Image (cartoon, rainbow, N blue to C red):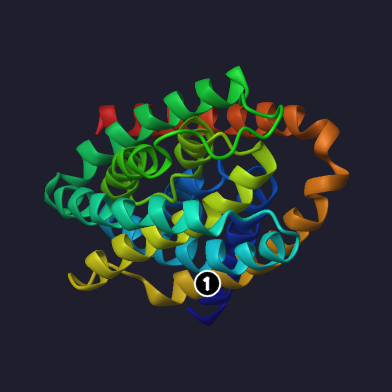
Amino acid sequence: MNDLVTLADLLAILCGLLVGFSLALIGGGGSILATPLLLYVVGVRDPHLAIGTSAVAVAANAFANLIPHARAGHVRWKAAFMFAATGVTGAFVGSSFGKLVDGQRLLVLFAVLMLVVAALMLRGRRGGGADRYPRPHLFPRLGAVGFAAGGLSGFFGIGGGFLIVPGLIFASGMAIIEAIGTSLFSVGAFATTTALNYAASGLVDWRAAAGFIAGGILGGWLGALGAHRLAKTRGTLHVVFALAIIAVAVFMLVKNLRG
C-alpha cells in the first residue's frame, strides 16, 4: 500500500509539473489537462473529486507562476483586478451548476470543450502586435468578458487561461506577453472560487492536490524562465499541447460514451 501511495504521489508531482510549465509558458493549455490527468494517471476515481482537486492545484500554481511574470513587468494590474472581479462571480455560478451535473455527462462535455480548446490553439493566438492598451470602454468590456470566462472556468473546474488570454487582448488591447502574465491572476482567482465551492462539499483530494502544487510550482518557474528564450518556438509548443489535448479528449469520449 505504501508503495502504491508513493507512486501516486510521484505521478501527481509529475502531472503538476506539466500543468505548471504550460501555464507559465503559454498562459494556458495545461490546466485543462489537470482533471483527466488526475482521473487517468493519478487514479482519482470520482469526476467531481478530480475537478475540485484540479481547481485547488491550478489556483496555487497560477498564483505562484504569477510572481516571475509580475517581476518582469508583464502584469496589467488594473485590468487584472477588473477582469477577476466579475469573473469570480461567474466562477461561483458555474461551479455551483457543475456540481449538479452527473459526473459522466460532465466528463463528456469536458472532452468536447477540450476539442474546442485544441482547435483554438491550432488556429494560433492573435494580438501579438503593437500594444493598443487601453481600448475605449475598457472596464465594461473587461467585466463582461471576465464574467463569461469565469462561468465556463467554474463549470468545468479549469483555470480558463485559453479563454482569458485572448479575452484580455480582445477587451483591453494589451500585448500578448502582458495578457499571458495578467491572465494568471484571473486563473488563480477563478480556480480559487471553484476550489472553495467544491471543498465546501468535500470534493477535494488534498494529498493529490499537494503533489500537483509541488510539481506545478517547479514547472511554472521553468516555464517562466523559458517564456522569452522559447518565444520563437511558442507556436510549435501550441501545436504539441493541442495534439496532446485532442488525444486525451478522444480517449475520454470513447471511455465515457461507452460507459
The answer to whether residue 146 is above or below residue 250 is below
What residue is shown at x 58% (from left), y 54% (from top)?
76
- Decide which of 175, 212 is in the foreground and name it: 175
Decide if residue 160 is on the left or right side of residue 225: left
Other residues around mark 1 within 10 Å, as few (<14) / some (14–19) / many (≥20): few
Query: For the residue marked with disc 1, what is the amino acid?
Result: Leu
Decide if residue 198 is on the left or right side of residue 122: left
Quarter of the image where one finds residue 48:
bottom left
Residue 163 position in % (x across, y down): 45, 37
- Decide which of 256, 173 is in the foreground and name it: 173
**Can you say which quadrant of the picture contains the C terminus?**
top left
What residue is shown at x 37% (from left), y 65% (from top)?
192
Residue 257 position in % (x across, y down): 27, 27
- Decide which of 237, 78 is in the foreground and name it: 78
Residue 167 position in % (x across, y down): 46, 35
Decide if residue 220 is on the left or right side of residue 225: left
What residue is shown at x 29% (from left), y 44% (from top)?
147
> How many numbered badges does the structure rendering display?
1
The answer to whether residue 34 is above or below residue 1 is above
**Observer able to see residue 125:** yes
Q: Secondary structure at mark 1?
A: helix
The answer to whether residue 70 is above or below residue 175 is below
- Provide the residue designation for mark 1: 4
What residue is shown at x 39% (from left), y 42% (from top)?
142
The answer to whether residue 105 is above or below residue 87 is above
Question: Which residue appears farthest toward the top when viewing the image?
Answer: 123
Residue 93 position in % (x across, y down): 18, 51
Decide if residue 124 is on the left or right side of residue 227: left
Question: Which residue appears farthest toward the bottom when viewing the image?
Answer: 2
**Observer able to see residue 45:** no
Quarter of the image where one finds residue 107:
top left
